[in-house]
Image (cartoon, rainbow, N blue to C red):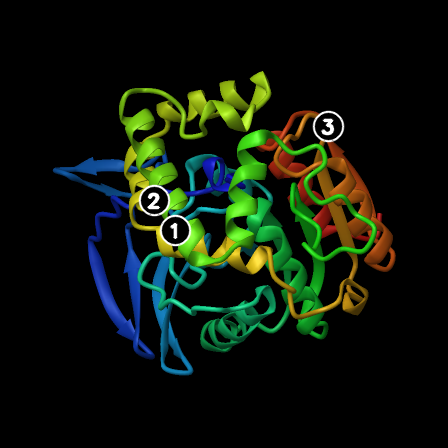
């Protein structure tokens, strides 16, 4: 379980006060943001920010997305971890707002109501991204991805070089076929078991994913954390995940991630254990590679490999493990805004 989404996902309980159609998309205002400045109106929350929750059709497939902090002076696209959801946590929304970014989050195939794409490669998400960017009218943007989303962010930077201004790979993985890399070295036992199953294909992997998802929700609903003990998370990560229970809408967000995201989770990890469909040397935009010193889900060797293969990539070390703090998020956004310094 490459669980960056534990820190960077968002509630489903989006009470919609108004909706209008724009170019076939749903423009939702007054969406529940987990914002303490929002005001209660019956069972709805009217938030200060405006969120566009929409969808496009790409080659006959439905692709859902959310656009946060509309009108901010900077733009970034975020690829969440595995499993995940386009509905972001209050912590990430607040950090994004503080950094002055408008943020686009696209559900990858199999997540939410985004259509599945069996057999897809990491690079194939670029087609969905390109279609959404055209729909929302974005021409230039920064890109970052956390955990299982990091390789997808790198693919976007590689294939959209004229649009991407900077790209950050955060607690992510190296390609499964990386030459000279012991891919499983430094990973916890649970992560090794999961990726070995994914490498065998869907028949071997789906039963494991379904069990992990069910166990995660049972633990969460009992007040625990979603990551099983055999993933051997460091105490800093475990404390951070436990603290998420205090966030508004947390269980709803996790239900969307774990109960409704199994197909997306499956397709992500199958794609991670196949050839990605692009080369790291293709990336010409400013890039940075961020890793946690105590991370047991994506080891430092993976980040060293990325740094050795992405031209000019900058090294950034995080103090903790796999779970990002608000300070980490602000540092990432600061780099995306000023990648040359």
Q: Nearer the viewer, residue 42 or 265?
A: 265
> In the displayed image of the protein, which residue is found farthest to the bottom?
59
Q: Can residue 11 be seen at all in this image of the molecule?
A: no
For the residues labelled 3 and 2, the Cα–Cα distance comes to 30 Å
Residue at the image point whose x is 28% and y is 29% from the top: 218
What residue would you read off at disc 1?
Answer: 206
Against 207, residue 40 (above or below) is above
**Mark 1 vs 3, N-terminal side:** 1
Disc 1 is placed on an element classified as: helix
What residue would you read off at disc 2?
Answer: 210
CB-based contact (under 8 Å), mark 1 and mark 3:
no
Q: Left or right of 59: which side holds 73?
A: right
Disc 2 is placed on an element classified as: helix
Disc 3 is placed on an element classified as: loop
**Mark 3 vs 2, N-terminal side:** 2
Q: Left or right of 207: which side holds 283?
A: right
For the residues labelled 1 and 3, the Cα–Cα distance comes to 31 Å
Give residue 20's quadrant in the image: bottom left
Badge 2: how crowded within 10 Å, few (<14), some, or many (20+)? Answer: some
CB-based contact (under 8 Å), mark 1 and mark 2:
yes
Residue at the image point whose x is 43% and y is 47% from the top: 84
Residue 310 at x, y = what percent? Answer: 81, 58
Residue 279 at x, y = what percent? Answer: 75, 67
Against 218, residue 307 (above or below) is below
Mark nearer the viewer, 1 or 3: 1
For the residues labelled 1 and 2, the Cα–Cα distance comes to 6 Å
What residue would you read off at disc 3?
Answer: 293
Mark seen at residue 283: none
Mark nearer the viewer, 3 or 2: 2
């Amino acid at each position: 379980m490459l669980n960056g989404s534990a820190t960077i996902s968002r509630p489903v309980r989006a009470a919609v006060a108004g909706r209008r159609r724009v170019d076939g998309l749903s423009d939702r205002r007054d969406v529940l943001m987990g914002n303490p400045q929002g005001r209660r109106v019956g069972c709805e929350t009217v938030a200060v920010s405006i969120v566009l929750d929409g969808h496009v059709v790409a080659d006959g497939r439905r692709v859902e997305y959310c656009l946060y902090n509309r009108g901010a002076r900077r733009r970034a696209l975020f690829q969440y971890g595995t499993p995940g959801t386009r509905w972001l946590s209050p912590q990430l929304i607040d950090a994004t707002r503080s950094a002055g970014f408008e943020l686009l989050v696209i559900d990858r195939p199999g997540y939410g109501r985004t259509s599945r794409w069996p057999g897809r490669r990491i690079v194939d998400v670029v087609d969905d991204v390109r279609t959404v960017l055209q729909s929302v009218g974005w021409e230039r943007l920064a890109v970052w991805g956390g955990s299982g989303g990091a390789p997808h962010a790198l693919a976007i930077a590689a294939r959209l070089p004229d649009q991407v201004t900077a790209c950050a790979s955060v607690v992510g993985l190296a390609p499964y076929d990386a030459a000279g890399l012991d891919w499983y070295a430094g990973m916890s036992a649970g992560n090794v078991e999961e990726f070995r199953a994914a490498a065998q294909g869907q028949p071997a992997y789906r039963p494991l994913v379904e069990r992990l998802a069910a166990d995660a929700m049972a633990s969460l609903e009992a007040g625990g954390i979603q990551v099983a003990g055999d993933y051997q998370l460091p105490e800093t990560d475990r404390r951070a995940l436990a603290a998420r229970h205090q966030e508004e809408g947390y269980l709803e967000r996790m239900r969307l991630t774990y109960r409704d995201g199994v197909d997306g989770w499956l397709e992500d990890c199958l794609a991670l254990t196949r050839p990605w469909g692009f080369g790291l040397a293709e990336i010409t935009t400013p890039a940075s590679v961020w890793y946690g010193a105590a991370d047991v889900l994506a080891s430092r060797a993976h980040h060293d490999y990325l740094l050795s293969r992405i031209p000019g990539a900058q090294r950034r070390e995080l103090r903790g493990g796999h779970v990002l703090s608000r300070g980490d998020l602000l540092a990432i956004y600061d780099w995306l805004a000023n990648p040359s310094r």
